[in-house]
Amino acid sequence: AEPTDTGALDEIDFNIENLDEHHDEINGGASAVNGHDIDDNNDAKTGAANSGTYVYINDDGAEVRVDEEKKKKFEQERDEILGNIPKEVKERFGEICFARYGGYTGPVLILNPYHVSPGPVREEWMKMYNKCKETNRLEFMTHLVYWYGAYMNLDAAFSVLPSRNLLSFDKGKKEAEKKLVAGKKKKKEYSPELLERGFEEMEKDLKKQPSERHGYVDKTPEEHEVIIYYEEPSGVAFVQNSVDKEEKEEKEKE
């Protein structure tokens, strides 16, 4: 079976069944955005920003409007939390290694919790962090990891694992390769497809700097960010941010 989430301190359950839906709605193009139509005369079209906001162009060529007050609050909270994380945990952010879970051994990416999209995964990591902090056990923090190859099933793509479940790259790769061969010979119950996808995805990330690694899973906007897409040739803009899903659900209730 594919790896599923395991608990931080063996207690936390991810419960991210709706992550695929969340990812698709937030990360889609203009046609999939649950946002707001803006006419040609709207400030969003020109890139002008209201007081307290600024606009920049992201790598995809889309305009991103940032609420400076919310951004400042977010960054203060983020920096405080990251400052509390033990050095030996923080130094591994962006590291590619291998992990064991159940009978599965596969490649993983150790994640900075702020390099994943806002939503269920980060929230569950926060539960683990808060519990460790409240009990003065930050030195026992577990690692948030992404299982390479699990991008087709995001509700099973992330886990929080203790250090004892992590293997060095060389040792883990040898073990995983043996399991892959055994899987192809049908000597094991689990399918080798996950491992094959994992190796392929991992190899692409190995060429990147640690801070730039995210597999095939893109990060969605923070709550202080609004991404504006344009539908051509009409020039109609669509606004997207990380709370669009919640706004849609509230409107549906009404």
Image (cartoon, rainbow, N blue to C red):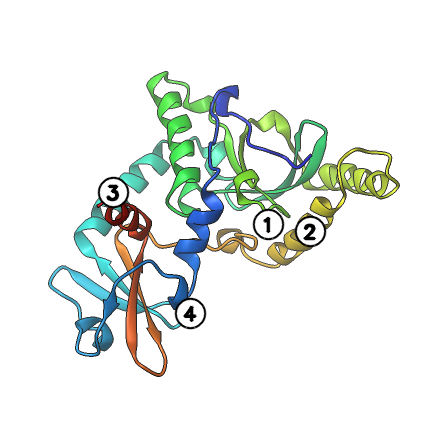
Are circles 2 and 3 on residues that touch, CB within 8 Å? no
Instruction: Nearest to the eye among marks 4 and 3: give it.
Output: 4
Instruction: Nearest to the eye among marks 4 and 1: give it.
Output: 1
- Helix or strand or loop: what does disc 3 sit on? helix
The numbered mark, 4 or 1, whose residue comes first in the sequence reads 4
Q: Quadrant of residue 30?
A: bottom left
Q: Residue 142's spot in the image, x, y percent?
A: 50, 28
- Helix or strand or loop: what does disc 2 sit on? helix
Q: Which residue is mark 3?
A: 76
Q: Could you tell me the amino acid type at mark 3? A: Gln
Which sits in the foreground, 133 or 139?
A: 133
- Helix or strand or loop: what does disc 1 sit on? loop
Q: Which residue is mark 2?
A: 197
Q: Residue at point 42% right, 65% down?
A: 29
Which sits in the foreground, 229 or 39?
A: 39
Q: Residue at point 72% right, 37% down?
A: 172
Cα–Cα span, label 4 and label 1: 23 Å
Question: Is 88 drawn above or below residue 73 in the view shown?
Answer: above
Are circles 1 and 2 on residues that touch, CB within 8 Å? yes
Instruction: Nearest to the eye among marks 3 and 1: give it.
Output: 1
Q: Residue 173's spot in the image, x, y percent?
A: 74, 42
Report the quarter where the N terminus lies: top right
What is the crowding at mark 1: few (fewer than 14 residues within 10 Å), some, or many (at least 20)?
Answer: few
Q: Which mark is residue 60?
A: 4
Q: Residue 234's spot in the image, x, y percent?
A: 31, 81
Q: Could you tell me the amino acid type at mark 2? A: Arg
Q: Residue furthest bottom?
A: 233
Q: Which residue is mark 1?
A: 152
